[in-house]
Image (cartoon, rainbow, N blue to C red):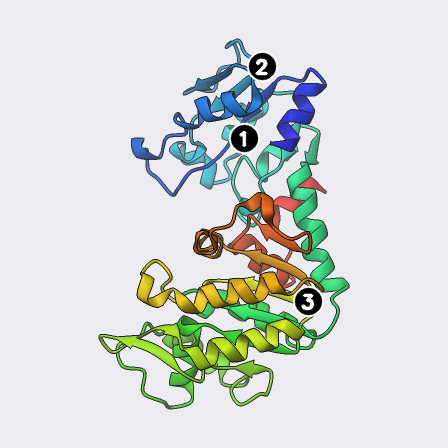
Amino acid sequence: MPTVKLLLKNQIRVVILSHRGRPTKNKKLSLKPFAPILQKKLNVKVKFVTDLKTSEDGDVLLLENLRFWPGEEKNDASFARRLAKLGDFYVNDAFAVSHRKDASVCAITRYLPSYGGLLLEREVKNLSAIINYSTRPFVVVIGGAKIRDKLGVIKYLWNKADYFLLGSGPAATFFAAEGMPVGNSLLDKKSIPKIKKFVGSRKLILPLDVKIKNSQILDIGEKTAEKYSEIISKARTIVWNGPVGMFEKKEFSDGTKSIWKAVFRNKKSRIVIGGGETLSSFSLTGKSVSSLPKNVFFSTGGGAMLEYLSGKKLSGLESLK
C-alpha cells in the first residue's frame, strides 16, 4: 500500500500485477474480490482487468491472477513483453516471490526501467541486518512441518547463531536421526543424512517433552515451552520461521502461543518473523498488527526469507540489478 499510495500521490497511473495460490485457471483464486478492497483502502477507482490491454480507464488497474497465464511461471520472454507494454517503468514490491523466476519478477526487467518498492526495501534492509549486524545471543526458532527447507538457514547461520530451537515438526526428524522412536510423525527421511552432523551440538535444542496424538508428535510440551521462553528472553537477535506445533487445532496451539508471548516480552532484541503459517498463527495472540513492538519485523516472505537467510541470491533482486 505505501508504494501504491506514493505513486498515486505523484499522479502516476498504477497497474497491479499479482499472484494468488498455485492455480491452473481456478476461478476461486481470482483476484477480482480484491478490487473493491483496494478501492476502499486507496479511495480511488480500481478497475479489475482480465486481459492484457491498456485501453481501460482508471488510476489503478488490478490485473487478473498472473498464474492463470502459463507464461508467468515459465518466465516467458514474450509474456513479459506483453506485461511491459502495460507501463513505462516497473516496480517489484513482492519480496515473497522474489526467489521465483517468474515473468513478472525477472523477465519483465529486461524491457522496462526497474526498481524495488518500499516494502521490498524494508525486507532487504531488515534481513540484511540479521546477517550482517546481528547481536548475540542470536536465537533461531525453526518450526513448520519439514526440516528440508530450513537446512540452508541452519547451515548458513550456524556460526552466527547461538541456539536453534526446534519445533515439533523438525524435531521429529532429528529424533529419528538420533535413533529415537517417533511413531507416525511426519518425517523428512531424505534429510536425515544431512542433519546428522548437527546432532549432539549444544547449539541445537530439541524438545524436552512433546504432545502426541495417534502416535504423531504435534506440539512441544510445557517444559520445552518454558526452556525455549527462557532462551528467547536472553536473546538480542531472533529469527523465527514456522509455528512449533499444529496451532490450527486448539489442543496443539499452546507451544506456538508460548513462543509469541516470549518474543513480545523481549523488548531489547532485533526480531524477524516470517513464513505464511507463522504469520497466520499470530491470530493466537489476539493482538492487531498495528500493536506490534517496534523491534519486531514481519517478513512477507516464507521461502524467499529462508533463501535470503541461507545466503542465496534471489533471482528477483538480481534482476533489478
User: In the rendered image, which residue does mark 1 sit on?
Assistant: 80
Which label's residue is closer to the chain start, 3 or 1? Answer: 1
Amino acid of disc 3 = Thr
User: In the rendered image, which residue does mark 3 sit on?
Assistant: 237
Single out the mark in the foreground, 3 or 1.
Answer: 3
Height in image: 267 above or below 2? below
Q: Is residue 158 visible?
A: yes
Q: Assess disc 1: are there few (<14), some (14-19) or many (≥20) residues with their C-alpha within 10 Å of its C-alpha.
A: many
Q: Residue at x 55, y 73 (%)?
A: 229
Which quadrant of the figure contains the N terminus?
top right
Which label's residue is closer to the chain start, 2 or 1? Answer: 2
Q: Of 12 and 251, which appears nearest the observer?
A: 251
Label 3 residue SS: strand
**Image side of residue 227 versus residue 8, left or right:** left
Q: Is residue 244 visible?
A: no
Label 1 residue SS: helix
View extreme (left): residue: 214
Separation of disc 3 and disc 1 at Cα?
40 Å
Which label's residue is closer to the chain start, 2 or 3? Answer: 2
Height in image: 65 above or below 213? above
Label 2 residue SS: loop
> x, y percentage for residue 36?
44, 22
Q: Residue at x 43, y 69 (%)?
A: 255
> x, y percentage for residue 251?
31, 66
**Image side of residue 6 versus residue 52, left or right:** right
Q: Residue at x 68, y 52 (%)?
A: 294
> x, y percentage for residue 141?
55, 69
User: In the rendered image, which residue does mark 2 sit on?
Assistant: 59
Amino acid of disc 1 = Ala
